[in-house]
Amino acid sequence: MDLMSMAHDDGHTTAAAHTCPMIMVFHGGHCERILWRSWVAYTVTEFAFSCIAFFAMSFLYELLKFLRVQLARREARKEAEQLAEEQRRKALGDCNGCSETQLAEIKDKTYWQRIFNMPHIIQALLNFIQIIISYLLMLVFMNFNYWLCLSVILGLSFGYFFFGYVQKDPKESDCCP
C-alpha cells in the first residue's frame, strides 16, 4: 500500500490524499492540503488565494506585535504622568483654601488589581491571538511548499517594514534578553 495516499487520521484513502499528498520535503506546485483536512487547494486560483491569506495573516502578526508595544508604551506613559502629577502636587505644598488634614497616600496597586485591569486584559488577549497566529504560520511553513513559505516570509517582512520601526531601542527585542 502506498503510504503517500493514506489519510493520517483513520487509514482510509480519500480523493484529496490521492490528488494532493503531503510531501515532507521542500517542493513547488499548487496542489496542497493546508492546515486542515478540508482546506485543499486543487487549482492555481485556490492556491493563490491561500498564499494571499497567509501573506495577510503574517502581516497581521506583525501588526499585533506593533499594537502590543504601542499599548504598553501608552500605559507606561499614563502611569508616568500620574506619578509626575502626584509628585508635583507634593512639591508645591501650597493649597489655597484646603484643610490642614492630609489625604491618605495613594497606595500601589495590588497584584490582583494589576492583573485584572483593562490594559492588562487587552494585552493578554492580544498575546493569545498572536500565539495562535504564530503557530498557524509555523504549521503553514511546515507544508514545505516554496510558495506558501514565501508568502509567510514576505508577509512578515512587509509587516516588519511597516510596523517594526517602533523598536528603536535595541533592548526592546523579541529575542535574547
Image (cartoon, rainbow, N blue to C red):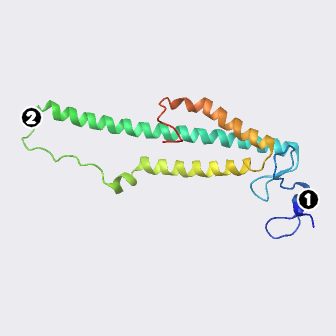
Q: In terms of depth relative to the viewer, which is nearer, 58 or 117? A: 58
Q: Residue reaching furthest front? A: 176
Q: Is residue 146 visible?
A: yes
Whether the residues at callouts 1 and 2 have beta carbons within 8 Å, the answer is no
In this picture, is 131 found above or below 18?
above
Task: Out of 46 and 159, give the one closest to the viewer.
Answer: 159
Q: Residues within 10 Å of mark 2 (few under 14, many from 20)?
A: few
**Residue 31 picture location, percent across and down:** 87, 49
Q: Which mark is residue 111?
A: none
Q: Spatial distance from mark 1 to mark 2, Cα to Cα?
A: 86 Å
Q: Amino acid at mark 1?
A: His
Which residue was labeled with disc 2? 97
Q: Amino acid at mark 2?
A: Gly
- Compared across the picture, whether 173 is left or right of 7 comes to left
* Residue at the farthest right position: 1
Crowdedness of circle 1 by 10 Å Cα count: few (<14), some, many (20+)?
Answer: some
Q: Residue at x 55, y 40 (%)?
A: 65
Q: Residue at x 49, y 29 (%)?
A: 168
Asked if 112 appears above or below 58 in the picture, the reply is below
Residue 57, percent across and down? 67, 43
61, above or below 38, in the image? above
Q: Nearer the viewer, residue 19 or 168?
A: 168
For residue 116, say whether it is visible.
Answer: no
Q: Position of residue 165 (x, y in %)?
A: 55, 29
Q: Position of residue 123 (x, y in %)?
A: 48, 47
Instruction: Tell whether 102 sits left or right of 20.
Output: left
User: Of marks 1 and 2, which one's residue comes earlier in the chain?
Assistant: 1
Label 1, on which residue?
Answer: 18
| Residue that protrudes farthest toward the left in the picture | 100
Q: Residue at x 8, y 44 (%)?
A: 101
